[in-house]
Amino acid sequence: MGRSPCCEKAHTNKGAWTKEEDDRLIAYIRAHGEGCWRSLPKAAGLLRCGKSCRLRWINYLRPDLKRGNFSEEEDELIIKLHSLLGNKWSLIAGRLPGRTDNEIKNYWNTHIRRKLLNRGIDPATHRPLTGSDNHQNNITTTTAAAGNSSPDVTTTTTISFAPTTPISTHLVKHEVEDIKIINNNDSLDHRKIKNHSPENQERCPDLNLELRIGIGPAQEQNNAMSSSYIPHQQQSVEYHRQKLVTGGRTSGGAIICFACSMGIQNSKECSCTSSLSGTSSNSTGYGYDFLGMKNVGLDYRSLEMK
DNA sequence: AATCCATCCAACCGCTTCTGC
DNA sequence: CGCAGAAGCGGTTGGATGGAT
């Protein structure tokens, strides 16, 4: 009951590409562009499967690829993006010009994982590594939304990488408020990172991985004690999804999609151009399908990486 | 010099998602 | 709407390389 092979394997080369194969592939794509990968090998005179050609081109032969070591800035960006997106290497690669998903994935597994472990951070959860931190096992993916499901109305959803098991609201509140204090002081006072147990103490305070999704500027105003303000009550993403779909809407300002908020405008990821066209300040445009919240009117301008 | 071991990374594989009919 | 084919994605593998013994 297996799937049909993507190509006739009996007549295809495998393994490392030769210079001649590279040249053929480059010449063909220069002449014809990237088209149907399945038919490309035959047309280009290559004994390779289309998948292999695509991979070779994307990961190695593309002229816009950046070669060489990753910079410290790229390192930190990858870490932050990974904390937000999880193992979505293609999305992460979209934010690093000249880098491929495969390259970033390899780099993550060989360098950054170790780097985070040395910092005492679990690369999977971006939380401090502690032996007794059993609740972290509840997190199956770093993109998982967490928090309690209390249906209280608030203006901001915090997508936390905290435990997925129910935890009391006030604990989350305190934790978040402490982060706020740190940001306001623009300092790295470790004592203010409260985690309610010594072993949970943040070991890398500059890596705050709370993800906030604001619902709208007007409501944001109510909370505008500071740019890093996070409301008292944490909401589940699902609750906001339902609320927004059934009537919750942004109260002002156009909505940009997640892709644009991440700085990759005009990419294929961008979903805002159509919904933005002709919208006014009371736009009811829809947002990007972020974390499965398709068509939810979220304001990604307030999506922050801190 | 030979062997072992760890690391790196290109490439593969299988699954999911997208797209056209 | 459902199906099939194509493309895309992420996990994994295996060969090359370099350092340690």
Image (spheres, coloured by chain):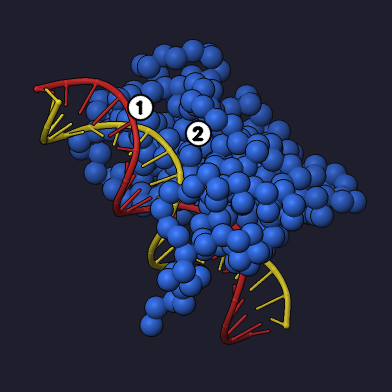
Chain colours: A blue, B yellow, C red
Q: Which residue is mark 1?
A: A115
Residue A190 in view, yes or no: yes
Q: Are marks 1 and 2 on the same chain?
A: yes
Side of A80 relative to A190 (left or right): right
Which residue: 39% across, 31% down? A112
Q: Which residue is mark 2?
A: A78
Residue A212 in view, yes or no: no
Q: Residues within 10 Å of mark 2 (few under 14, many from 20)?
A: many
Q: Closer to the camera, A78 or A233?
A: A78
Q: Residue furthest right?
A: A278
Q: In the rendered view, tell whether residue A112 sits above or below residue A72.
A: below
Which residue: 32% across, 51% down? A138
Q: Position of residue A99 (x, y in %)?
A: 56, 37
Residue flagged by tag 2: what amino acid is it? Ile
Q: Position of residue A24 (x, y in %)?
A: 61, 51
Lower sequence index among marks 1 and 2: 2
The chain that hosts pointer 1 is A
Q: In the rendered view, tell whether residue A146 sits above or below residue A184.
A: below
Q: Closer to the camera, A194 or A169?
A: A194
Which residue: 74% across, 39% down? A218
Side of A129 relative to A177 (left or right): left
Q: Position of residue A199 (x, y in %)?
A: 24, 28
Side of A172 relative to A129 (left or right): right
Q: Closer to the camera, A255 or A18?
A: A18
Q: Position of residue B9 (x, y in %)?
A: 43, 38
Q: Closer to the camera, A170 or A242?
A: A242
